[in-house]
C-alpha cells in the first residue's frame, strides 16, 4: 500500500496535525525521527540491477516500511541522530557522519513527492540565496547589505533617507547557559551607528527600514497561497512581531494577483513545495518581500485564522489537486 513517510521531531505539534489529517483520511503513514536511528530503528537498503532505485526497509520495534511503498515524504526538522553513549567523541563524530551519509543519503534518494526535499531546504535557508531568487522573480525587496565592515554600515545609512535595521543572517536563536535566546530585528539609532563595535566579528545583515501598515505571513503549499495580515499593537512588535506575540492580531487576506505569480515563481526557483514567507505591507498597500522559511511555523496561523493549511499539506503529500 502506498505510504507517506514523515521524518520530523517527535515533539513537533504541526507535524502531529498533518499526521492526524492524513490518518483521518485513511492514509498509511510511517513517522520516524532521525534520533530514532540507529538505536531504535534499523535501515536496510539494497541497490542492484533488478529494480530501479533503492529497495529495502525502515524498521522500528513496532512497525516496518518498505522503501518501495513510499509515495511521498514530509521532512520537517528532525532531531539529530542519537548514538551510543559508550562511544568516544571521535567515534561519535565518525558514526554521525556515516548515519548522515547512509540513512540520510538513502532517504534523499527516494523518488517520491517531497514537502520539502532536504537539499532544496538546505539551499533555500540561505538568506542571500532567497533575496537573489526573490529579486529574479520580480518581488520588491529592501535595499540590503551583508558585511562585517562597520564603515560599510555607516555608508549604507548615509545613502538612505530613512532608518536602517540589523538582523541575523541565519537562525536568530541560540542557547547560552542552558537558556534559549533570540536575536530580534533592531532599528538602528544614531548612537548605534556611532558605536558599531562587534560588527567585525561575523557577518550581519542590514536593510533599509520599510514603513509598514502591517505585515503578512504568507504560507505557500504547492500552488495554494494562505495569507494572514499580522497587526502589531505594541511598539516592540511593530519593529519585530516575533518579539511580542501577545500583542498580535491576525486577519486572513488575499494576495494581489501579480504578486501571486511572482511568489510561485520564487518557489519554483527554490524547488520548494512549502514555504512560510514574510512581507511588509506599506501604508499605500505595496508589498515588500523579507524572507522565506522552508520549514516555517504555520500551526498558530491556522489556529488563529482557520486557514486550512494542514489540509493543504496533506493534499500536497497525497498528490491531490485542489
Image (tube, rainbow, N blue to C red):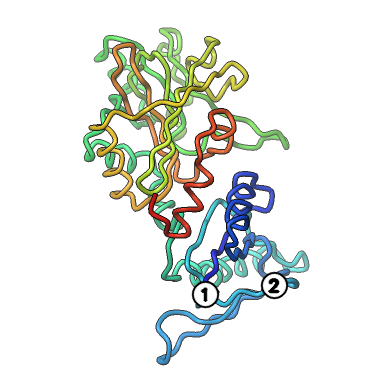
Precedes in sequence: disc 1 or disc 2: 2
Q: Is residue 250 left or right of residue 188?
A: right
Q: In this view, does 183 lie to the left or right of 290?
A: right
Residue under the image location 65 percent in, 65 percent down: 90
Residue 256 location (% of width, % of height): 29, 28
Whether 203 is drawn above or below 39: the answer is above
Q: Do the residues labelled 1 and 2 touch (CB within 8 Å)?
A: no
Residue 37's disc number: none
Quadrant position of residue 211: top left
Residue 301 location (% of width, % of height): 54, 32
Residue of label 1: 69
Graded by Cα atoms within 10 Å as few (under 14), some (14 to 19) or many (20 or more), the crowding at tag 1 reads some
Q: Nearer the viewer, residue 21 or 258?
A: 21
Residue 178 location (% of width, % of height): 73, 37
Given the current orientation, which residue lies at the most extreme bottom position?
Answer: 50
Residue of label 2: 63
Given the current orientation, which residue lies at the most extreme right position?
Answer: 86
Quadrant position of residue 139: top left
Q: Is mark 1 on a helix, strand or loop?
A: helix
Amino acid at each position: 500500500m502506498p505510504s507517506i513517510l514523515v521524518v520530523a521531531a517527535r515533539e513537533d505539534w504541526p507535524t502531529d496535525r498533518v499526521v492526524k489529517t492524513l490518518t483521518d483520511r485513511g492514509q498509511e503513514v510511517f513517522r520516524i525521527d532521525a534520533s530514532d536511528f540507529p538505536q531504535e530503528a534499523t535501515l536496510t537498503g539494497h541497490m542492484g540491477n533488478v529494480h530501479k532505485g533503492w529497495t529495502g526497509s525502515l524498521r522500528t520495534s513496532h512497525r516496518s516500511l518498505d522503501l518501495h511503498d513510499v509515495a511521498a515524504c514530509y521532512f520537517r526538522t528532525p532531531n539529530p541522530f542519537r548514538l551510543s553513549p559508550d562511544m568516544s567523541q571521535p567515534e561519535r563524530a565518525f558514526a554521525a557522519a556515516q548515519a548522515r551519509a547512509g540513512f540520510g543519503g538513502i532517504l534523499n534518494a527516494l523518488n517520491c513527492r517531497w514537502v520539502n526535499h532536504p537539499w532544496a531546504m538546505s539551499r533555500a535557508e540561505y538568506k542571500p540565496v532567497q533575496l537573489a531568487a526573490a529579486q529574479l522573480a520580480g518581488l520588491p525587496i529592501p535595499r540590503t547589505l551583508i558585511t562585517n565592515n562597520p564603515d560599510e554600515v555607516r555608508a549604507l545609512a548615509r545613502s538612505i533617507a530613512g532608518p536602517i535595521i540589523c538582523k541575523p543572517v541565519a537562525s536568530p536563536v541560540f542557547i547560552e547557559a542552558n537558556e534559549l535566546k533570540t536575536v530580534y530585528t533592531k532599528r538602528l539609532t544614531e548612537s548605534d551607528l556611532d558605536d558599531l563595535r562587534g560588527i567585525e566579528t561575523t557577518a550581519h545583515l542590514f536593510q533599509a527600514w520599510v514603513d509598514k501598515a502591517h505585515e503578512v505571513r504568507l504560507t505557500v503549499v504547492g500552488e495554494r497561497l494562505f495569507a494572514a495580515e499580522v497587526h502589531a499593537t505594541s511598539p516592540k512588535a511593530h519593529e519585530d512581531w516575533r518579539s511580542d506575540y501577545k500583542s498580535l492580531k491576525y486577519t486572513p487576506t488575499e494576495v494581489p494577483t501579480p504578486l501571486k505569480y511572482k511568489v510561485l515563481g520564487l518557489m519554483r526557483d527554490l524547488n520548494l513545495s512549502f514555504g512560510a514567507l514574510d512581507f511588509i505591507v506599506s501604508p499605500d498597500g505595496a508589498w515588500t518581500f523579507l524572507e522565506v522559511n522552508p520549514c516555517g511555523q504555520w500551526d498558530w496561523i491556522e489556529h488563529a485564522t482557520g486557514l486550512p493549511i494542514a489540509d493543504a499539506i496533506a493534499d500536497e503529500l497525497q498528490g491531490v489537486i485542489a
